[in-house]
Amino acid sequence: MLFWAIIKVALRSLFANKLRSFLAMLGIIIGVGAVISMLALATGARQKIMKRVSSLGTNLLIVQPGQRGFHGVMSGSFQNLKLEDAVAILEKVPNVAQVSPVVRSSFQIKYFNKNTRCSTIGADTSFFAMRSLVVETGRVFTQGEVDRKVNVAVLGPATVKNLFDTGDPLGKTIKINRANFEVIGVLKSKDERNDDQIIIPYTNAMKKLLGITSIHEIDIQSSSSEMLSEVQDATTKLLRKRHRINEGQPEDFSIRNMADAISMASDFTNMFTFLLGGIASISLLVGGIGIMNIMLVTVTERTREIGVRKAIGAKERHILQQFLIESVCISGFGGIIGVGFGVGIAQLIVAMADFATVVELQSVLMALGFSAAVGIFFGYYPALRAARLDPIEALRYE
Amino acid sequence: MIQLASVVKSYFIGGSSLRVLDGISLHIKPGEMVAIMGPSGSGKSTLMNILGCLDRPDAGQYLLEGKDVSKLSKDQLAEVRSQRIGFVFQSFNLLPRVTALENVALPLLYAGNTGGSAPTERAKVALEVVGLADRMHHEPNQLSGGQRQRVAIARAIINDPAIILADEPTGNLDSKSGKEILQLFTNFHNQGRTIVVVTHDPEVAQYCSGRICLRDGRVIERKETAA
């Protein structure tokens, strides 16, 4: 009952000075709004980056040839990754689920008068599953087609659009570097990087298009993400042995670990979140100082009221509570309005700048809690000053 | 009811100490209505502050209803004020933007729930006693000076205090309202309440049964109520 009575008093005095209360709130509104919208921006960015990174496929190791170089000057890659390496990895390294040799190049692609240049990837049938690529229409190539070096191609949706516009590509024949390939499937749209590419059997790409015997990359999928580092170690060991690298010598290949890439990306996005959240928190702090200022004025202005309350029996804690609740009301309402404001800003960012923003419940709760804490922290000193007032002095105050 | 023994109170002003109360001893019996009189600077207000437990004496003893309140802590004094003392000020000191009813109920808020009927009900009764039942939902700025002082009196009596302390209660009122207020006090006095009125107006003092005259921090005259 006492509590509600005090809240009622606090609200009444806030409403009695509408403009002033609003101005005091404004600092918190802007502060909370900034925190909410910045965190939304950071979360949006994180989700986008994580999606992109994890779209590379989890449990994935990528073996690439080492860079040929002399005293730090890089001059192209070794051509020392062989198909046999890929086969050996699949056969000898435990906990390997799938392996795909990969060759890459960029070719001119033609369909009648349409022309485009895009990345052409020669891969095994396992490549699609490992990179989580799914066909929208048609099918992927089969093991038989790989073995027989059949000229078939799976196209990314962006490539299809470039070559066929809205027409149906299935069964059509396109020219890759002047060789005819039949389009057998179209990939589902994933992200910009994966949408504009053509995937053909690696056998074909090596023999007919590129005329090479080495491969550019070996993709390895471990049976589980826990096994990833074991597989990586075993693969390193196996390849060192196969490439006859003596102990202490540097490797002529490198293995990229997708889990590392994910943790790196998450480190980066966490830093981004802290940075944006931190900057926004400063404005919340400034808002708190505004509250403190207003509360000090209020206390001075209401010295006489405090004196009266004390004369009729209010203890120090009653006065303290009253003014604390008042400042928490300012910051609390400011916080609630600020959340609305922040969500609005986040929507505006989406509409105007095409950034993804995600408002998380957790950041809303955090901002609200923080603003209430700001109210308590910055309201405490003025409230304490009010509570400590000498009733005689306060009653005499004009 | 009230017993003061050699009460001393000094203030420091600009480095020098000023002895405002210089050994005051007095006794106020239950049911007495006493006027404390004296020229300005005689220590009336300081004495009133000490009687009202707003301040503590530097030396000496103050027994309120037989209980020594001269050594109590600030919060304990607040407790005494909320339970045993009713204040009536010259400038009413009602809270603005708060209805008469809520103003009257305010002391109950700080006294904690002392049982009995609900605070609003008790405030209504108190307002009826001072004859303002029809104005209970008005805010102070909608009331006349006399009406405001009645609200203040209702607030002073709501906790059924041991003493009512009135500091120049008629100082801001026209003579007609002033007389009404004094009549109200007289009624309370007749009901057996203890009332202390600080004033320099001899006319006010005439309503009182007893009188304490101060000069330079000492009691120079004490006229007690005939038993």
Image (cartoon, coloured by chain):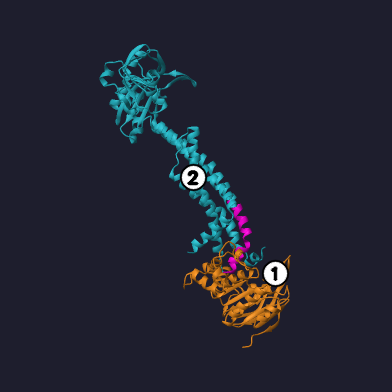
Chain colours: A cyan, B orange
- Which residue lies most toward the bottom here? B227
Q: Position of residue A253 (x, y in %)?
A: 40, 23
* Amino acid at the residue labelled 2: Gly
- Badge 2 element: helix
Pick the quarter of the image with the C terminus of chain A.
bottom right
- Is residue A97 shown left or right of residue A384? left
Q: Position of residue A19 (x, y in %)?
A: 59, 51
Q: Is residue A371 above or below residue B84?
A: above
Quarter of the figure with residue A311: bottom right
- Is residue A209 shown left or right of residue A383? left
Q: Is residue A296 magenta?
A: yes
Q: Position of residue A328 (x, y in %)?
A: 53, 54
Residue numbers of the magenta segment: A291-312
Q: Is residue A364 magenta?
A: no
Mark 2 to mark 1: distance in Å? Answer: 55 Å
Q: Is residue A57 above or below residue B197?
A: above
- Which residue lies most toward the front here? B134
Question: On what subunit does the disc labeled 1 rest?
Answer: B
- Which residue lies most toward the left here? A144
Question: On what subunit does the disc labeled 2 rest?
Answer: A
The residue under label 1 is B11
Residues at marks 2 and 1 on the same chain = no
Magenta stretch mostly in which secondary structure? helix
The residue under label 2 is A340
Mark 1 residue crowding within 10 angstroms, few (<14) / some (14–19) / many (20+): few
Q: Position of residue A16 (x, y in %)?
A: 58, 56
Asked whether the viewer can see residue A246, the reply is no
